[in-house]
Image (cartoon, rainbow, N blue to C red):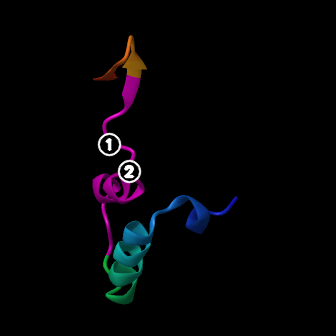
Amino acid sequence: MKLRDLLSVYDKKKFYASAAKNEKHSRKEWEEIMGTKRDTCKRIGGRVRRK
């Protein structure tokens, strides 16, 4: 499985736009692009709660 298969269309556009400008991204910005800082939710007893 390749990276392009995992990213959403929005994330791909954001990535290619930044690549065209030859910008250097920090680790924090890459984490935001990849979605590692998103909230994770879990269903407990019918409710959806954040972990």
Query: Furthest residue to the right?
Result: 1
Viewer-proximal residue among 3 and 40: 40
Q: Which residue is mark 1?
A: 38
Q: Looking at the figure, which quarter contains the N terminus?
A: bottom right
Image point (55%, 58%), residue name: 6
Q: Which residue is mark 2?
A: 35
Q: Amino acid at mark 2?
A: Gly
| Residue 14 falls in image quadrant | bottom left
| Label 1 close to label 2 by CB (< 8 Å) | yes
Find numbered disc 1 in the image and state the secondary structure of the residue it sits on: loop
Q: Place residue 4 in its image quadrant.
A: bottom right
Q: Residue at x 49, y 62 (%)?
A: 7
The span shown in magenta is 24-42
Q: Nearer the viewer, residue 21 or 11?
A: 11
Q: How many neighbours does mark 1 have within 10 angstroms: few (below 14), some (14-19), or many (20 or more)?
A: few
- Can residue 35 be found in the magenta stretch? yes
Near-viewer residue (20 or 6): 6
Q: CA distance from mark 1 to mark 2?
A: 6 Å
Residue 36, placed above or below residue 17: above
Q: Residues within 10 Å of mark 2 (few under 14, many from 20)?
A: few
Question: Which disc number belongs to residue 28?
Answer: none
Q: Reply yes or no: does residue 27 show up in magenta.
A: yes
Residue at 60 percent of width and 64 percent of height: 5
Q: Quadrant of the C terminus?
A: top left
Q: Residue 33: x percent and y percent?
A: 36, 60
Q: Amino acid at mark 1?
A: Arg
Q: Secondary structure at mark 2?
A: loop
Report the number of numbered marks.
2
